[in-house]
Every structure is written in structure tokens, then in C-alpha cells.
Amino acid sequence: MIPRLKPDLGWRELRAALSSPGDGDVERFELAFAREMGQRHAIAFPYGRTGLMLLLETLGIQGREVICPAYTCTVVAHAIVHSGNEPVFVDCAEGSFNMDLDAAEDAINAGTGALVATSLFGFPVDLDRLDEIRRRHPRVNVIQDCAHSFAARWRERPVHPEGVAALFGLNASKLMTSIFGGMVTTDDDDLAARLRARAAERLRPATLGKSTRRLLYFLSLYPAFSRLVYGAVNRLERLGLLASFVRYYDEGEIDMPADHLEAMTAVEARVGRAQLRRYREIVAARRSRARRYDESARDLPGLDLPPLVEGATYSHYVPVTEQRADLLRRARRHGVQLGEVVEYTVPSMRAYRDRAGSTGTFPVSERYSRQVVNLPIHAGMTPAALERTVRVLRRCLRPAGSDTE
Ligand SMILES: *Cc1c(COP(=O)(O)O)cnc(C)c1O
């Protein structure tokens, strides 16, 4: 079975996780992260969403509207609500996974506190258009959600420094991981000092229990993604037995994890630092796999490939097809696990659909939520695995009936 997801972890990360904890592991990770991103400050959080929530609090944004994409990870909206603000959703631009910035600008009013610009799946947000919005609305705080786009570039400009701060997610499904965890980066000394002070006030120190749980979870990732075990896990998943573990959201709830105010652990910071050393290599490898897919899968019927964009990070490789359900089912029979990713729009979820910011229609987001397929693009995708995946796609995309084993 070719898994749809596989964290890029090796012996270095394992050694980092098992080495004895030193004082200041988290601070060292923050310094290394800031340096790698070319920013003055990086502040670690237990989750990316915690970073967003405390950032909004620190900016003094309360009882305001925060503009964000309709098509994004639901935890972003949860963090906005938990910070005491109202998410206002904006559809994708036609032909782009990112929020329509014209519509986003139209949504700005006197009550708008912030705008979360997301480079979804690693496709860089249009900074030229965003510059105009920032010039015309200097009081709206632009926050870059870079959970999919560590150091993505629009034309030649890195996306993450173009706002008051940027947000990064670091769980095991991201480009690079610190087991769980998140970062906020900024070049603003004053904001950084205030965010640190707020984090110190609002976050409890990590307990030994949490550190142990994180370490055990991390160690379990190694066998879980080995070929043999993954097959078994996949069967469990098909039976629905894993649903309660792998689902990160509940349609009807706007909730945060129980430990979202418990600081990042030292073991997470050590793994994160080991990953950081390889992150350029990780992104470069993804770009080259994206080019390979583009060359070999371009002519497949019924499958629209994502664009090849110079500065994109390809956190996900996401063709669009009307045959998604059939394709996923058939490909799995041929040993390739394709995934769905962001298979919802946030304003249509039960918890959001009656809220003020969910009015309007989101036709492009709706279509992507039904049609986006997540092709495997992780480190396990050798050229041979990638060719096999394309061969399987070619077979499975044929009209029903001609799908012979
Ligand atoms: C993962 C993710 C985040 C942050 O997630 P956490 O689980 O809170 O670290 C934020 N935005 C997007 C688009 C994401 O995919």
C-alpha cells in the first residue's frame, strides 16, 4: 500500500527525541526557526491554533470580525472564535485554492480587526494584490497562515514576512513537524515581546505526562508508517475503527484540544530543530515530485492537475476530479491510498452555518471540497512509487466497467 501521508522522519529526529532533555530546548528551537525563516522572532506554541488565538488577543482584537478563507482548515476559525472574535468567510478565487482577495477587500468594514491570508496547499498568496489591501486598510492586521507554506514565495518574495505576523502548524501531517506544536514569527520587536508575555501568562508549563505522551506518539509514527503496519492500519481505518483517532474536528463543535494551553514540550522542540535542518531539502524534494506528476499525469482524462508554481511548497499535491469517490475506492484496490484533504468548507459546517460570518455563497470552495484529491507526494514517493501511482490513476480513471484487475 502506498500511503497518502508519511512524515519525513529519519534517525536524526529519532536521536533528537531520545536524547536527554536540556534546558532551553524550546528557546533553541525558536531561535533556529526565526533564523531559518529570516525573521527577528519566532515564538513556540503547543498548536498553531493556540498561536493564532493568543496573537489576536495580543493585538487587542476583541469582538471584531476576522476575515479568513471559507476553504481552509477548520481549526483556524475555531481559534478566531475562541479569541472572542467572529470569522467572516470568503470564497476561493475562481481557479485558485486561495481566498479571493477582491472579495476579501469587499468584506472589510469598520469592525474588521484582521485578515488571515492563507497560502493553501503551499500556493503563495498574491502579494501584489495583498499590498494594495494593506496600503488602503492599514488598520487591518494581516496575518499570514503559513501552515502549508513554510517559506513559499510569490514571484521572488517570501510570503511569511508580509503581515504583522505569520502562523505555522507543526503537527505530523505538515511539511515539517515538531510532533505537535506551532510557531508565530514576526519582525516587530514590540509585538514579539507582548506575545511572549501573554504566552507566559496564558500557557501552563508542559507536564511530564504530556512529554511522555508526545514521545510515545512520536515513536509510534515510525512503525505506523512502515509498509506492513500501514496496511493493517488502513484496514482498520476502512472499518471505521480509527475514525475517532484520526478525525481532528467535530462538525458541530467549535472546540480546542484539552491541552491547547499547555506549552510545547522539550521533546517536540528537539524533533522540530532536527527537522528544521532538513526543511529546505524537504520542500525541494516536493517541488521535484510535483514536476514529475505534472509531466507524467498531465494527459490523464478527468483529472485537472494543480498548477506548477515556482515558489509553491506543495504541502499537498491536489488535482481536481468529478470522480473522486470512485477514484479513491478503485485506487485503494490497486494499492494506492489517495486522500481527501479539506473535504469541507468551514461556513457549511454545522457549528458555523448559522453564524453571522457564514452568510453568502461559497461555490468555488464547495466544488473543491467535493473534488480535490490528495496525491501522495511525501518522502516515501520514490520515482518508482510515483510512476506506479500514475499508472494506477490511468487505470482507475477509465469509465466504470473497463476497470479490470
Ligand atoms: C494545520 C493548520 C493550521 C494549524 O493547525 P494546528 O493543528 O493548530 O497546529 C493552521 N492553518 C492551516 C491551513 C492548517 O492546515
Image: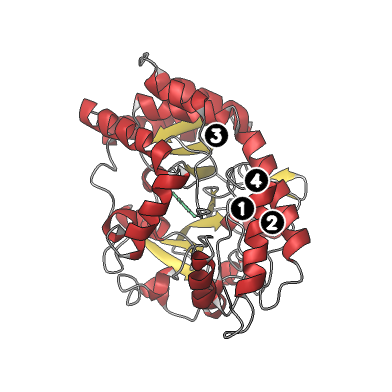
Residue 54 percent coordinates (x, y): 37, 43
Residue that mark 4 sits on: 382
Label 4 with label 1: CB-CB less than 8 Å: no
Residue 118 percent coordinates (x, y): 56, 56
Quarter of the image with the C terminus in it: bottom right
Q: Would you identify the image quadrant in which residue 216 lies?
A: top left
Residue that mark 1 sits on: 122
Question: Disc 1 residue type?
Answer: Gly
Question: Disc 4 residue type?
Answer: Thr
Residue 192 percent coordinates (x, y): 47, 32
Q: Residue at x 69, y 56 (%)?
A: 387
Mark sitting earlier along the chain (2/4): 4
Mark sitting earlier along the chain (2/3): 3
Q: Is residue 47 above or below residue 138?
A: above
Within 10 Å of disc 2 (Cα), the crowding (few <14, some 14-19, many 20+) is: some
Mark sitting earlier along the chain (1/3): 1
Residue that mark 2 sits on: 387
